[in-house]
Amino acid sequence: MTGSRGKLFARALAAAAGLSLMAGVDAAEPAPAGPSVEALSFNCYTCHGPDGRSPAAMPSLQGKHADYLLRRLLEFKQGKGHPTIMDRIARGYSDEELADIAAYIAAQTPSTGERR
Ligand code: HEC
């Protein structure tokens, strides 16, 4: 008795799992290979402000050229430019990721029309 009930329960579970799996596949976009450049850049906005527009003492990234941002990031990665924290952050990314992030941030337009 309990055996057949157990089987039924297991079958119901499997069906439910199958359903939710299918629903997941239907709803989801094709999975990206890694975090998008947008997601990577959002890490920087924690300190540098939304879209790299810093409201406080942190240097603003917005309005700076991608080549400049990348040069600074590569320097930080090598410990140059007297970094306090950026050396550790820059080392967390490949050179390609830093180039992508620099290009992405440089392409952002000011969200308030204000530039610092
Ligand atoms: C924990 C806070 C923090 C995070 C997160 C952070 N930064 Fe910084 N950033 C700083 C500080 C502080 C400086 C000033 C240099 C230093 O002291 O290391 C700086 C400086 C810079 C500069 C030089 C700006 C200039 O005008 O020369 C660039 C470029 C930069 N950061 C890019 C980034 C990018 C890209 C990311 C994300 C991958 C990032 N930062 C994440 C704190 C942060």
Image (cartoon, helix red, strand yellow):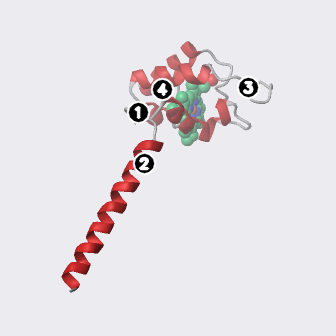
N-terminal of the pair, mark 3 or mark 1, is: 1
Residue to which mark 1 is pinned? 32
Q: Three-letter amino acid code at disc 4?
A: Phe
Name above or below for residue 56 compared with residue 2: above
Mark 3 residue crowding within 10 angstroms, few (<14) / some (14–19) / many (20+): some
Q: Three-letter amino acid code at disc 2?
A: Gly
Residue to which mark 4 is pinned? 76
Q: Three-letter amino acid code at disc 1?
A: Pro
Q: Would you say 21 lies left or right of 55 here?
A: left
Residue to which mark 2 is pinned? 24
Measuring from the top left, give residue 59's x and y in whole percent: 66, 30
Tell me the distance, in whole angstroms, between the alpha carbons under discs 3 and 4. 25 Å
Who's the residue at 60% across and 41% down the image? 46
Q: Which mark is residue 61?
A: none
Who's the residue at 79% across and 30% down the image? 112
Tell me the distance, in whole angstroms, between the alpha carbons under discs 2 and 4. 41 Å
Tell me the distance, in whole angstroms, between the alpha carbons under discs 3 and 1. 28 Å
Residue to which mark 3 is pinned? 110
Tell me the distance, in whole angstroms, between the alpha carbons under discs 3 and 2. 36 Å
N-terminal of the pair, mark 3 or mark 2, is: 2
Measuring from the top left, give residue 53's x and y in whole percent: 70, 31
Tell me the distance, in whole angstroms, between the alpha carbons under discs 1 and 4. 28 Å
- Dot in front, 2 or 4: 2
Cβ of disc 1 within 8 Å of ligand 1?
no
